[in-house]
Image: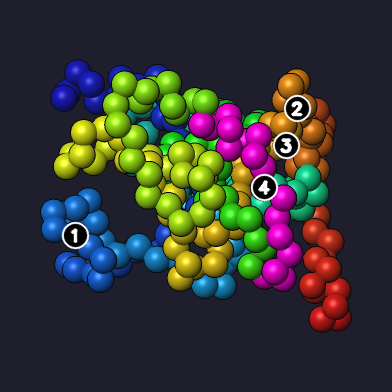
Amino acid sequence: VKMLRGSADFFGLNHYTTFLMSPSSMEPGWDIPSMDHDTGVKMEQNLSWPMPGADWLTVNPPGFRKLINWIDNKYNSLKKIPIIITENGMSDKGQTEDYERVSYFNDYLEQVLLAMYEDGCNVKGYFSWTLMDDFEWNDGYTFLLAVKDLCNATPFIAEMGRQRCTLRHVMPLYNLHPLFTICVISPILRATSGFFFRKSEKGTVILCPTRESNPRSLIRTKFGLFKVDFDSPLKTRTPKLSAHNFANIVRTRLIDFDYIKPPTEFNRLLE
């Protein structure tokens, strides 16, 4: 341990959102044993924080500055190793005019600069997440994809190309084993929205979660700064508004701290 202490070349940090934490020995939904029960910590988010995409990703930029300071104080006691932010970003619902992501990058980068120049933290690099949508863990190329906008009951156009790409990626890995599907939506979604191994079965269980109790979780969300047309043979990539904004930040080294996103159509009606 003594040989390892202080030997790191850099600290890689992924950050998306902030949680409020408090001690707890047991909460509803915790299994025993489980990671939640072992840590003995209740994690929750303030309902007033914006939630532009995924249901777990709320926006609270000041939390990022606090985290950077904590890491700098915790791991830089022996030598000042650089902190490289290896992932930072948010998801959206697939729109190209992603004003919320523009605000997200502006506000979170501001907190990075405050941590560097006001607090003296040794931050040396920053990577936005992500250039294009990736094969996202158990969700594949879909992130809880729904076919209907639950806010105004306007049907989404199902991105069948995106689903087929996931299907082509998954199926060859398990074509020698029985394939079980558990789903209540369309057949093609049964193999695209999440999969895991079940010890009681010989093969792979493909699970499509719906979580009707939380409407936000049914709305598809994307992390990419470029929108990919999976129906196109060329997989055409269209830069979103945030891609232009982030490129401008890199090119000019300037951030528009006064940026205000345009009001949504719903807010315009309220006004």
Magenta includes 235? no
Decide: is 268 above or below 226. below
Camera sees residue 133? yes
The boundaries of the magenta stretch are 151-167
**Comparing marks 2 and 3, which lies closer to the viewer?**
2
In this figure, which residue is indicated by the disc labeled 3?
Answer: 227
Q: Quadrant of residue 261?
A: bottom right
Q: Nearer the viewer, residue 16 or 9?
A: 16
Of labels 4 and 1, earlier in sequence is 1
Where residue 60 appears, x then y in whole percent?
56, 59
Disc on res. 158? 4
Decide: is 191 above or below 265. above
In this figure, which residue is indicated by the disc labeled 2?
Answer: 232
Where residue 121 appears, x then y in whole percent?
50, 39
- Does the residue at mark 4 contact the one at mark 1 (Cβ under 8 Å)? no
Q: Amino acid at mark 2?
A: Ser
Disc on res. 251? none
* Secondary-structure class at tag 3: strand
Q: Residue at position x 19%, y 53% from top?
A: 34
> In 3D space, how far apart are the residues under numbered discs 2 and 4 (Cα atoms)?
15 Å
Of labels 2 and 4, earlier in sequence is 4
Q: Amino acid at mark 1?
A: Asp
Q: Residue at position x 76%, y 53% from top?
A: 99
Q: Amino acid at mark 4?
A: Ala
In this figure, which residue is indicated by the disc labeled 1?
Answer: 31
**Comparing marks 1 and 2, which lies closer to the viewer?**
2
* Left or right: residue 87 compared with residue 258: left
Camera sees residue 57? no
Of labels 3 and 4, earlier in sequence is 4
